Image (tube, grey):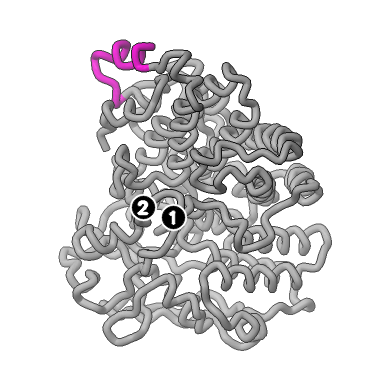
Amino acid sequence: MTINMKNILKGLAAAVCFSTMLTACTGKFIDYNTNQHEASQEQQEMDNLLTGALFRQLQRSVFIFNDGTYLDSDYQVMYNLLADSYAGYLAPTIASNNGTHCGSYFMTESWRRAMFANKYVYAMQAWVSLEKTAQEQGLEHVSAMGKIMKVASMHQVADYYGPIPYSESGKTLTPTYDALDEVYAQFFEELGYAIDVLNEYKNSNASIFSKFDYVFGGDVVKWIKFANSLRLRLAMRVVYADEALAKAEADKSLNDLTGVMTEAGDIARLNPSLINYTHPTYEINVNFNDGDCQMGASMDVYLNGYKDPRASVYFKPAADGNYHGVRNGIHSTNWSSYRNAAGKVSAPNASNLSLTWLTASEVYFLRAEYAIRWGGNAQELYEKGIRVAFEEAGVSGADAYIADATSTPADYKDNVSNNSMAALSDVTIAWDNAADFEIKLEKIMTQKWLAIFPNGCEAWAEYRRTGYPQLLPVVNNDSDGAVSSALQIRRVPYPHDEFDTNPTGVSAGVAKLGGLDNCGTKLWWDKKPRN
């Protein structure tokens, strides 16, 4: 994807280029990145307009969508064609290269670079400018929220690629790559600082940037709960790599006086009542070729097997009234049978979805995992997670669902071709205190996976970390041996651009990766032994 420099400058007051932006820069690089694009001091201080604009851009960068600068097609190549597919949520039914693309582990260059390039251009550049302005104006609480959003946005990049430029971003044109454990250490440090600042600020009973805040409308307490919940998410991410660090960071969030998210209303999302938008998944399915993505086969397996009432919220039934998914990695020269008009598979029912950063149900499942590892009432937290997830989805029947001790994932029956296969799991829903650790973990992770749809970034990361839920493999594996079909894809390789524009930096990243720069190398936190 070619990055448009006019779009980079749009909405930015100060420009700090990173190596990840260099392919977007023209011969007038210096002209495009000088102070004539900065607002004056008077303008900066006038009703916080500049700071507010940067604040809003940083919010929009957590999940990039059609906001006038970026398009739904940017979301498609950043999330939909990679993480959403690898998480088992959605299957690309795009007629690109007859199906030989990232969905089958052939890493199309413009797709694999989209997360890296767009996040550094849009998220990190906005954060650098926001931090500079907030520090100059003594807005420590705004700086704190900026750090929270920076972590919320950039941990997606780290979880895609591994070592990334972080500590030196914005300080040099050729930043070094920090090892992934070092990046996570910075995440925890920044979140800890932000939580401390906001906990002190909340006592003033003041709201923060309410007219610029698309997420919480300036509610300080909700910002703190979100930051604590985000720290808990990242703490559990590293549990197989550094259990002591995971527990220590999780304890900080769980013991904080303000605490974590506990109610459906605590949801962190771009609030549709505060900003008008349509979820990109809807646009991708409805307006892109009559269906560029459909229900994934693994969603078919779990939603149908569990008779899950969220199926009708997440997806539209096929013409026969049932829900049918599509396996990843299909090669085809004719995709008409997979399109909406054919009525053979289920399209995402995404017209009412919001761009959600984190939910209370996810937090309950994180706490349930904490409980089976280090103590606590795991059953109570697990069941509360399901109840809150149903509330978030707007469906009833949670009590009957929680009590279901017999339903298991259904075998997958392909409604278009001959790619049917048996379910890989027989895990049930109802909690069983007598079950072993792995069965309990599989229950928790499976229900979390169902609850956080369509957040493919988080779902793919957690699948890699734990191995759950058990997802169907690709039909065709075009990784040239780099990826085991059983283990599935472990990361996204670095963009080729980086080897041209920042060879020293990216070479350091590859060295810190601990393996080849391909799709099969595991990230630092991906340490759980798997067959």
Residue 225 located within the stretch drawn in magenta = no
- Report the amino acid beneath label 1: Pro
- Report the amino acid beneath label 2: Tyr
Q: CB under 8 Å between callouts 1 and 2? A: yes
Residue pictured at 77% horizontal, 51% vertical: 254
Q: Is residue 60 visible?
A: yes
- Mark 1 or 2, nearer chain start: 1
Residue pictured at 61% horizontal, 80% vertical: 398
Residue pictured at 74% horizontal, 50% vertical: 259
Q: Determine which residue is flagged by label 1.
A: 272
Q: Is residue 508 visible?
A: no
In screen coordinates, is 178 left or right of 11? right
> In the picture, which quadrant includes the C terminus?
bottom right
In screen coordinates, is 7 left or right of 434? left
x, y (%) of residue 438? 69, 68
x, y (%) of residue 332? 21, 65
- Within the image, what quadrant is residue 186 found in? top right
Residue 27 located within the stretch drawn in magenta = yes
From which residue to which does the magenta span run?
Answer: 23-37
How far apart, in angstroms, are the residues tagged by discs 1 and 2? Answer: 7 Å
Residue pictured at 41% horizontal, 17% vertical: 39
